[in-house]
Amino acid sequence: MSDTLIEIKDLKCRIDNQNILQGLNLKINKGEVHAIMGPNGSGKSTLSSVLAGNDNYEITKGSIIFLGEDITEMSPEERSWKGMFLAFQYPVEIPGVSNINFLRTALNERNKYFGIDSIPAKDFLKMVAEKSMLVGLDNKLKNRSVNEGFSGGEKKRNEIFQMAMLNPKLAILDETDSGLDIDALKIVANGVNKLKSSENATVVITHYQRLLDYIIPDFVHVLHEGKIIKTGDKSLAFELEKKGYDWLKTDAVI
Amino acid sequence: MSYTEKELKKELDNKSYEFGFVTDIESDKAPTGLNEDIVKLISSKKKEPQWLLNYRLKAFQIWKTMKEPEWAHVKYTKPDFQNISYYSAPKKKKELQSLDEVDPELLKTMEKLGISIEEQKKLSGVAVDFVMDSVSVATSFKDKLGELGIVFCSFSEAVQNYPELIKKYMGTVVPYTDNYYAALNSAVFSDGSFCYIPKGVRCPMELSTYFRINESGTGQFERTLLIADESSYVSYLEGCTAPSRDENQLHAAVVELIALDKAEIKYSTVQNWYPGDKNGKGGVYNFVTKRGICGYRSKISWTQVETGSAVTWKYPSCILKGDYSIGEFYSVAVTNNFQQADTGTKMIHIGKNTKSTIISKGISAGKSQNSYRGLVKIGKGAKNSRNFSQCDSLLMTDQCGAHTYPYIECENPTATVEHEATTSKIGEEQLFYCMQRGISEEKAISLIVNGYAKEVLNKLPMEFAVEAQKLLEISLEGSVG
């Protein structure tokens, strides 16, 4: 199989009759880290939602090829089973459902899809212990209801913990740095780095260059009005930090 | 031989009987309609003592003067009371030879509920071998209860065998003057369950109607009387998660619980009567009066999971008469399609230092209407009494409704009454979050709903809780919109 993990071709989508993505092209290979930056309203979060299969968005053109398969019309859960993971910008609370129960259900649903037996409780708990260490997740949080009453930092850390448990091929981190203090940021970034391998890839969506000090990107893309208008290496992030986006916007018009 | 109404009238006019028709009717069904003679007929058919007949007749007189209540947030066509047959002899269910003869849809649901084949047979009326396990279990069960002096039998048996207990307690918690349907039930009740736990006895197992031998099927007008004598304990399970398809449209039961000093009664109900079809046609009307009275330091705990019936009208309540007594109400009520439920509780604090807890979780789906209606009443003498109420509503669609009608009447300044209420809609965001993690929509709904109802489900006895959880899942299949 080729090294291409995902290829997005001329993707256009809209919500409530408003066009958001307007012909987006992006190719990500195994082992790569891509950062997507851009001003507010440029379509960053839409991109992550659409990749994960949120059907609130209507795809009007283009396709998403994931591991050689067209997944443009695929359900979110099937994408998940095939290795897509989205760390949410605003992780959702599910009262009364423990973190552990939630993850066990998720893993078993995936196993069922692949025709594998449910994971034995002992192995599961061992895995939980291992992975929660990796992201420094407080022991107490594992038995609490999913994200309920978690602090902002705990929620984000929990996202990375779930990511570690599900071990995805493509992880999309949607503004995982928002609302994190510098220590929490380091822990989260550290977790992400530990999960990196030559077989998977990471997309980091962020407003700030700060996170990219800890998760070093191979590519930085600038998203504007639903299109990638510039691609560079990590130095582009520094440039953006200094100059803002306006100079690029003018370029884009030309 | 069956009667037409005309023939019946003729016979009544001729007065060719003493207490109504006694033995000369071979038909197992009374003619439709309701009048004093029908009440007499029921009583004599059951060979009841005179005082019980008088009780029925008084109830009937009162009922005639009463009006059907209209305050509940439900809409339905009122039953035609003259078009109901009020007595049918313990009819033998048609015995089927094998499960192949049973409605496949019913079997499918039972399978989903995880009910064993043997149980499936029993529940759907398939002839079962006498060596079958559950029968022998039931027998040894009865022996064990007998050793402890626990009485657990049908109401009719109790009238014959323990008339003094029935006479002493029946109607003391729910008098026939209480409300329209309680009066109707008191006049025409068919059968039901009776249970007595002697002083100081802790009933070693969950009492379930399922295990009651010689049960004659649930009638339209069931009557349950449960007495826990001083310092005794009992956990009672009513109903069944298996779907009940009952021909009877109207069900008006009365349940009375009596917890004497320091006794504890835990009463759990799982109700899954036919709710009508997807278009709101048919379905059972369930108009029930359930109430318990607590003596000194006693405790009554109601737990209910309601998923069935087209119209539900039900308020399991506690009269906290004794000092330091405790009342609890835990409820999950699910309505889907066109179902309507108006349910809740009444906590009447009379004694000092009495305590009550109300946790109500409503789940509305489809185009259904789900209401919580509850009264917390703190009497003048209920010094230092406390109540905590929490009423949550979960909406699954844009077309359903959730309503909360809490009534609080407090006549004692030392009491503490707390009420919390929330309404939330099952979030697309929640569902998407689950699905992103690889949990399919159906599974996600059941996960979210069970999480939401967890506080109540946790109060159910273990095996009941597992079934109830699956029941929620099935009741809400394909219900998000």
Image (tube, coloured by chain):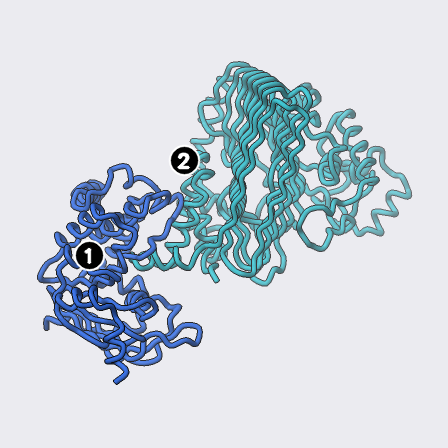
State left or right for residue A13 relative to residue A113.
right
**Residue B93 appears at what percent x and percent y?**
57, 46
Q: Label 1 amino acid? A: Leu
Are discs 2 and 1 located on one and the same chain? no
Q: Residue furthest front?
A: A243
- Nearest to the observer: residue B174 or residue A16: A16
Q: Residue at x 83, y 36 (%)?
A: B61
Examine the rendered structure and indicate whether residue A118 appears above or below residue A13: above
Hue used for the chain lettered B? cyan
Foreground pick, A153 / A50:
A153
Q: Is residue A4 above or below residue B457?
A: below
User: Splitting the image into 4 quarters, where does residue A56 fall?
Assistant: bottom left
Image check: B33 left or right of B356?
A: right
Amino acid type of the residue tagged 2 in the rendering? Met
Disc 1 target residue: A211
Q: A21 or B43, which is in the foreground?
A: A21
Chain under callout 1: A
Mark 2 lies on a secondary structure that is: helix
Residue A1 at least partly seen: no
The residue sitting at 63% across, 57% down in the picture is B282
Q: Quadrant of residue B63?
A: top right
Residue located at (31% from left, 59% from top): B436
Marks 2 & 1, CB-CB < 8 Å contact: no
Chain ID, mark 2:
B
Element class at badge 1: helix
Q: Nearer the viewer, mark 2 or mark 1?
A: 1
Residue B100 x %, y %: 45, 56
Q: CA distance from mark 2 to mark 1?
A: 48 Å
> Which chain: blue?
A
Where is B104 relative to B212, above or below? Answer: below
Task: State the residue position of label 2.
Answer: B462
Residue B308 has which mark? Answer: none
